[in-house]
Image: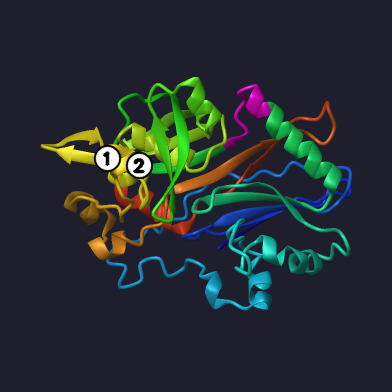
Amino acid sequence: MRTILTPEMGGYRVWGQVWGGCRQGLGICAVPKAAGFGTEARHQLQSRGSSKRLGSLGDKPFRRLLQPENLSREELVDVLREAVVDQKGKPGELTLVSVLPELSQCLGLGERELQVVRASGKETSGLVLLSSCPQTASRLQKFFTHSQRARKPTATYCAVTDGIPAASEGKIQAALKMEHTDGASLVVPVKSPSRKDFLKGVKWTLSHFRVLASGSGCALVQLQPLTAFPSQLQVHMVLQLCPVLGDHKYSACVGTVLGQRFLLPAENTKPQRQVLDEALLSRLHLTPAQAAQLPLHIHLHRLHLPGTRPRDAPIELLAPLPSYFSRTLQCLGLQYQ
């Protein structure tokens, strides 16, 4: 567990704390004052893997992962000093939103309420941006909306994929829709969508990708979504026939025959635990049962924000990799440059 704390400058404070978790290992950037939201908050992405020889992880390979259901409200508020949990949830479920009032009191914000400005997905690790100032939150939301319309990326993710993309970098564009079957919601690609399809909820999605390192049949990939759609990055990498490690929802859509990968129809493929070949399991020092617990290896590690004033330089926030992510990179011999 690692803490990032920047000094107060000009009366504004940006602080972040980073934790890697199975459902939501997140960094948090709290913005307590009214007019501004930044200082030169900056931290270099670092691998936290041990230099010692890696061996078996035992029955609980990811024992450092937070389990919110085992905590009381008070305990979770304490943990929130160093971690953030799932942004969304069912009524009554213990989530980030449900304990924001306690967190506000813990941070000494008085009557000011914290609200989520930007967060990574439900199962991904990375940064969460919080603000106690409605004006600042509104300004940031407008910045993100404008950037998205202008196709300017503001969020950069790292992912580890099972498979190496054919191109070292490029764009992934696909029409996606959400389908609800058997009590589950799945994102499904749509080939040659019609105008009628778009009226029914189909959306064009776009992501940039760049392979940062590759080896052992896997790749460390930088991803920058230019649109916002649930599970967009996971589905985009599946369309490249390179599912993300720990993707237990969409990886089954990639089949293999005689060493050749192909895409299975998403509509007819049920989600299942990701199956890794023996060579990859050996490199990761995991049993099949342990691989079934592998967290999703998508990490929101960088956010670009506007300066406090129009002429100020942009602000860059970075979150170090979770420990399980760093361990995977070390096992695969992949290095972040």
Query: Which secondary structure lies at badge 1?
Result: strand
Point out the image quarter for the N terminus. Answer: bottom right
Residue that appears at 63% across and 39% down? 303
Q: Which mark is residue 161?
A: 2
Whether 335 is among the magenta residues is: no
Indicate whether 182 appears above or below 1: above
Residue that appears at 55% across and 70% down? 68
Tell me which segment is drawn in magenta. 147-155
Which residue matches tag 1? Answer: 254
* Residue situated furthest left in the rendering: 258
Residue that appears at 83% across and 27% down? 310
Q: Position of residue 18 (x, y in %)?
A: 59, 57
Dot in front, 2 or 1: 1
Amino acid at dot 1:
Val
Residue 292 figure quarter: bottom left
Q: Which mark is residue 179?
A: none
Indicate whether 209 appears above or below 219: above
The alpha-carbon separation of the residues under discs 2 and 1 comes to 12 Å
Q: Position of residue 188 (x, y in %)?
A: 40, 38
Query: Can residue 320 be seen from the camera position used here?
Result: no
Query: Which secondary structure lies at badge 2?
Result: strand
Q: Position of residue 306 (x, y in %)?
A: 75, 33
Indicate whether 116 appears above or below 200: below
Whether 152 is among the magenta residues is: yes
Q: Position of residue 94 (x, y in %)?
A: 61, 68
| Sequence-first disc among 2 and 1 | 2
Amino acid at dot 2:
Thr
Query: Can residue 277 be seen from the camera position used here?
Result: yes
Q: Residue 108 vs residue 336: left or right?
A: right
Q: Residue 100 vs residue 156: left or right?
A: right
Residue that appears at 74% across and 41% down? 40
